[in-house]
Image: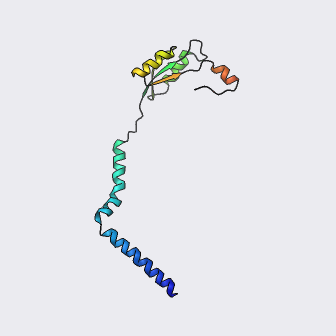
């Protein structure tokens, strides 16, 4: 019983010594208390809840299974996330406009989408 009491006294004296050591350093206490709040404040200042709107150009071949009207309707139905910038059948022109910064996103409609789906194959990216 004496050993158990001796161990409890040693542990409590060690904990008390560490608590007094921490309390003697007010900067350390301030850092531990206010540091997480400062990080949250900096994160909150930089956070933007609005997502960016992307100017999107669609590339679809003239013989595509998806008509241009459907692509345009789909592009306009995305709301403020996607700004419909048009449809073209020239992939090189679309990529050139992307490099020049005229559009933010180029979406290429697959050529043989029906055949790919009917043969149960994965689409190429």
The residue lying furthest to the top in this view is: 62
Q: Is residue 102 visible?
A: no
Residue 59 to residue 50: above or below? above
Q: Which residue is at a point 35% across and 42% down the rendered structure image?
A: 46
Q: Position of residue 25 (x, y in %)?
A: 30, 66
Q: Which residue is at a point 43% across and 18% down the rendered structure image?
A: 97
To which quarter of the image does residue 64 belong? top right
Residue 107 to residue 38: above or below? above
To which quarter of the image does residue 68 belong? top right
Q: Is residue 25 visible?
A: yes
Q: Which residue is at a point 48% across and 84% down the rendered structure image?
A: 5
Give the quarter of the figure containing the C terminus.
Answer: top right
Colour scheme employed for the rendering of this structure: rainbow
Q: Which residue is at a point 33% across and 52% down the rendered structure image?
A: 38
Residue 54 in the figure: left or right of residue 117 = left
Q: Position of residue 26 (x, y in %)?
A: 29, 65
- Relative to the observer, which residue lies in front, 49 or 34? 34
Q: Position of residue 86 (x, y in %)?
A: 46, 17
Residue 92 in the figure: left or right of residue 39 = right
The residue lying furthest to the bottom in this view is: 2
Q: Position of residue 98 (x, y in %)?
A: 43, 21
Total number of numbered discs in the rendering: 0
To which quarter of the image does residue 117 belong? top right
């Amino acid at each position: 019983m004496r050993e158990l009491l001796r161990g409890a006294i040693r542990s409590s004296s060690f904990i008390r010594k560490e608590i007094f050591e921490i309390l003697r350093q007010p900067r350390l206490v301030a850092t531990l208390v206010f540091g997480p709040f400062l990080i949250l404040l900096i994160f909150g200042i930089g956070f933007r809840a609005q997502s960016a709107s992307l100017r999107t150009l669609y590339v679809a071949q003239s013989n595509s299974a998806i008509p241009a009207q459907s692509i345009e309707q789909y592009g306009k139905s995305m709301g403020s996330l996607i700004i419909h910038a048009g449809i073209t059948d020239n992939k090189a022109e679309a990529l050139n406009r992307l490099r020049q910064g005229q559009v933010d996103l180029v979406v290429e409609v697959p050529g043989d989408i029906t055949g790919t789906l009917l043969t149960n194959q994965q689409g190429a990216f």
